[in-house]
Image (cartoon, rainbow, N blue to C red):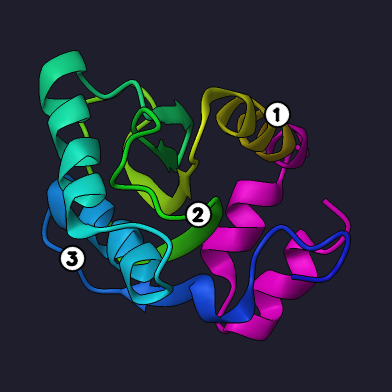
Amino acid sequence: MRKGEIFKKENILVGASVSDWKEAVRAAGGVLEAAGSATSRYTEEMVAAVEEMGPYMVILPKLALAHAAPSGAVLRNDVSLVTLKEPVRFGSENDPVHVVLCICCTDRESHREALQRIARMVMDEDIVDRLAAAASVEEILSVAEGY
């Protein structure tokens, strides 16, 4: 990742077809698995977190921030982004979700820093709509540039 980049090109999936929130979380986690940044256990920890604590990951209208606590299932700090062909419902007042951002971190400090960086990006009023509407990986990289 170059300085100022929040996403690596290979960690973006545009227009994923999923049938429910679990598949959406698994798609985002699967990107991190493919990158060698997390194991499938981490992906299942994210699903379990929603099952146990409710849809807290849906932090803004249309946006879920998928994550679980740092654990041995995380191999290195990383971020993925998945846009959905059809939005899904998590059971949140911010449903339906169009974009799933996913972070995995090896420790609590990295976790906090990643959350802060993403928070700065999503504070931009129309960023989620722009990410959701992006038709290509290049367009997402352009939208996210500078965060």
For badge 2, the amino acid type reads Arg
**Label 3 sits on residue:** 18
* In the displayed structure image, the side of residue 112 where residue 20 appears, left or right: left
* In the displayed structure image, the side of residue 63 where residue 122 appears, left or right: right
Task: Please say whether residue 126 is one of the residues in the magenta stretch.
Answer: yes
Vertical placement of residue 98 versus 125, above or below:
below
| Residue 97 vs residue 77, the one in the foreground | 77
* In the displayed structure image, the side of residue 39 where residue 141 appears, left or right: right
What's drawn in magenta, residue-wise? 120-147
Disc sitting over residue 76 in the figure: 2
Magenta region's main secondary structure? helix
Please, which residue is most extreme toward the top here? 53
Circle 3: element type: loop
Depth check, mark 2 against mark 1: the one in front is 2
Q: CA distance from mark 1 to mark 3?
A: 28 Å
**Callout 2 touching callout 3 (CB < 8 Å):** no
Depth check, mark 2 against mark 3: the one in front is 2
